[in-house]
Image (spheres, grey):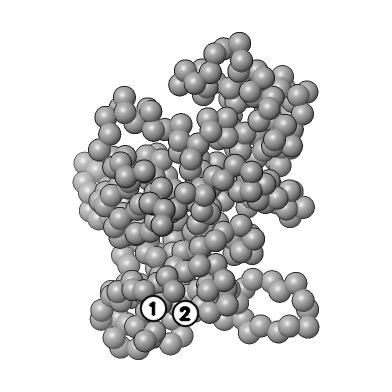
Amino acid sequence: MHEPLLEVNRLKKYFPIKTGLLQRTTGYVRAVDDVSFTLLPGETFGLVGESGSGKSTVGRAIVRLADKTGGEIKFKGIDIYGLKEGDLRQVRPKIQMIFQDPYSSLNPRIRVGDAIGEALLDHGLQPKEEIRDRVLEVLGFCGLSSSHYDRYPHEFSGGQRQRIGIARALILQPDLIIADEPVSALDVSIQAQIINLFRKLQETQGLASLFISHDLSVVEHLCSRVGVMYLGNLVEMAPRDEIFNRPLHPYTKALLSAVPIPIPRIKRERILLKGEIPSPANPPSGCKFHTRCPYAKEECAERKPDFRDVGSGHYVACHLVD
């Protein structure tokens, strides 16, 4: 059994709410509220949920773009929040992030080839005279040509920019990629190309990935395990086939009911959730989902359910599941 590459233990991230002239803290937005999971070497773990569920904040906390409020994040057994700046600099190349909008992370005045290669220079990972060849190699792997090296970001389409974002992550030969909604801003046909590129990465590079998305159909194609988040908490986590064939949590069932079925003759009943997602600044008591759950009972409002293993690595937090 492999040791986990990434361990997230009881992660919390609260954002303070400041009001008044003196900007006093009057409360907290509980964006991530006690989340735990592991990621094995070479595994692709999908984190799904509606907007505001906290899934992107989890990813940003792992790469330390958003400092955690509580809990622990270990990479290869090392607590990354316990590292000093020098040691953290050694770890950073091994954990790379791909963003939803790669254009915003590219300097419009710098040629794409230089932007991809600059991290190699910064970390001293390759002699300067060898960087161009290495960048061209990675560009080719990501479906771009050598002619793209000297172009500027504004000269590329959305799909090409995402390929550039993937190339920037790959150039450092990371062990873990955090992909935050990497295809949600793209047209469907371009999405398919980027998904195929991720599959190619899995097969040829053996990279571990945390794939964050609200699109369950994309997650089904790429991920071997899936975690479902609601209002800062994991409500269900299981191997992919378990989640898609035997969902247990009412929220997971509702999400899956909205996924289009490619075979028209197969009918699936759409589960419509009542109301809006509650504010993470003032979450409901007990099970946070009980205000929208069509099966909620009195216990659901009174006591928070445990996140427990119900067999075969299938975890769920629900009073309705025996």
Q: Which residue is mark 1?
A: 310
**What residue is drawn where x is 69% and y is 30%?**
139
Instruction: Specify the farthest residue to the top.
Output: 129
Image spot of residue 98 (x, y percent): 55, 41
Name the secondary structure under disc 1.
loop
**What residue is drawn where x is 48% and y is 43%?**
176
Quarter of image, res 129: top right
Q: Is residue 219 above or below residue 292?
A: above
Image spot of residue 236 (x, y percent): 43, 70
Q: Is residue 223 above or below residue 273?
A: above
Image spot of residue 244 (x, y percent): 57, 73
Marks 1 and 2: which is nearer the front? 1
Quarter of the picture holding the C terminus: bottom left
Instruction: Specify the farthest residue to the front.
Output: 1
Q: Is residue 247 above or below residue 159?
A: below
Amino acid carrying label 2: it is Leu
**What residue is drawn where x is 21% and y is 41%?**
22
Q: CA distance from mark 1 to mark 2?
A: 10 Å
**What residue is drawn where x is 61% and y is 15%?**
130
Q: Earlier in the sequence, mark 1 or mark 2?
A: 2
Q: Is residue 284 left or right of residue 175?
A: left
Label 1 CA crowd tier, 10 Å (few <14, some 14–19, many 20+): some
Q: Is residue 22 left or right of residue 282?
A: left
Image spot of residue 272 (x, y percent): 56, 79
Residue 316 visible:
no
Quarter of image, res 314: bottom left
Q: Which mark is residue 248?
A: 2
Q: Is residue 98 above or below residue 36?
A: above
